[in-house]
Image (cartoon, rainbow, N blue to C red):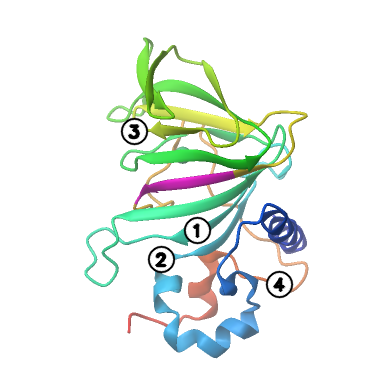
Amino acid sequence: MKRSEINRRIREGIEFFDQMNFKLPPWALFSPADWRKVVADAAEIFELQLGWDVTAFGSEDFLHTGLLLFTLRNGLPGSTLYPKPYAEKIMMVRENQVTPRHFHWYKREDIINRGGGNLIIELFHADPERNVLVPGKFRIAVNGLRRELSPGDRIILTPGDSVALEPIHAHRFYGEPGSGNVLVGEVSMVNDDTTDNCFIDGVPRFDPVEEDEEPEHLLAAEYRQHFAEVRHA
Ligand SMILES: [Fe+2]
């Protein structure tokens, strides 16, 4: 993705979260120069890669296959410095903007429609030990109520609805056309996006960045390259 597009999508995300009255932490608006001033105290944010994440999943067409996320909190499995076993993200999902089909080997996550439009989730039955989809019905909890689904069934989350995804639940989601942008929350077990995403159709989770202008805000995956000197306090 071009840096100019990442800058634009983050600006749009800031505006959307504000419109939806979802408050981000103050450092969501930091420039690289602002980070430089607090670098000595920012090891947790840098190490856990909290903050902005903009991806087109390798498609170069963010509006059709892409996602804008902000990681609010996370931990590091096995770490005594950052032992939180939980994570939280907020996302902006646009109408017909697809997050490709994937499951997580380890993480359980609740996906929550926190307002705006409707979120459509297509669900498939995964075998996380063999990295394949399997036939047959499976159970899932929507708003805490148990349901039985067949592979490919869709559920529609309207504002307030949530679904609890387990490793056997491969999922693909997008905003329902005509309903507006969706504010999507994720409350989950500790999260490692570099090792715990299995994209069934082989798409990458992160895009290379093409630097055509200066970054307005750093992506969470970029702190380390900008501030290589920062390590655990
Ligand atoms: Fe997921």
Q: Depth check: give the residue in front, 133 or 120.
A: 120
In the rendered structure, which segment of residues is drawn in magenta?
A: 184-189
Whether tag 3 and tag 4 are in contact, CB under 8 A, the answer is no
Q: Residue under label 4, please give it.
A: 216
Q: CA distance from mark 1 to mark 3?
A: 20 Å
Q: Which quarter of the picture shows residue 104?
A: top left
Question: Which residue, given by chain and number where applicable, does mark 3 sit on?
Answer: 167
Give the secondary structure at mark 3: loop
Other-residue count near label 1 (Cα within 10 Å), few / some / many at <14 / 14–19 / ≥20: many
- The kind of residue tagged 4 is Glu
Identity, as a three-letter code, of the amino acid under mark 3: Pro
Residue drawn at (42%, 47%) of the image: 187
Name the quarter where the N terminus is drawn: bottom right
Which residue is label 1 attached to?
Answer: 71
Mark 1 and mark 3 lie on one chain; the one further toward the N terminus is: 1
The answer to which quarter of the image holds residue 116 is top right
Q: Mark 2 near mark 1, Cβ–Cβ under 8 Å? A: yes
Residue type indicated by callout 1: Thr
Residue 81, x across and y down, in percent: 26, 72
Q: Earlier in the sequence, mark 4 or mark 1?
A: 1
Marks 4 and 1, how far apart at CA? 18 Å
The residue lying at 21 percent from left, 69 percent from top is 80
> What whole-number distance in Å separates the C-alpha atoms at marks 3 and 4?
36 Å
Q: Nearer the viewer, mark 4 or mark 1?
A: 1
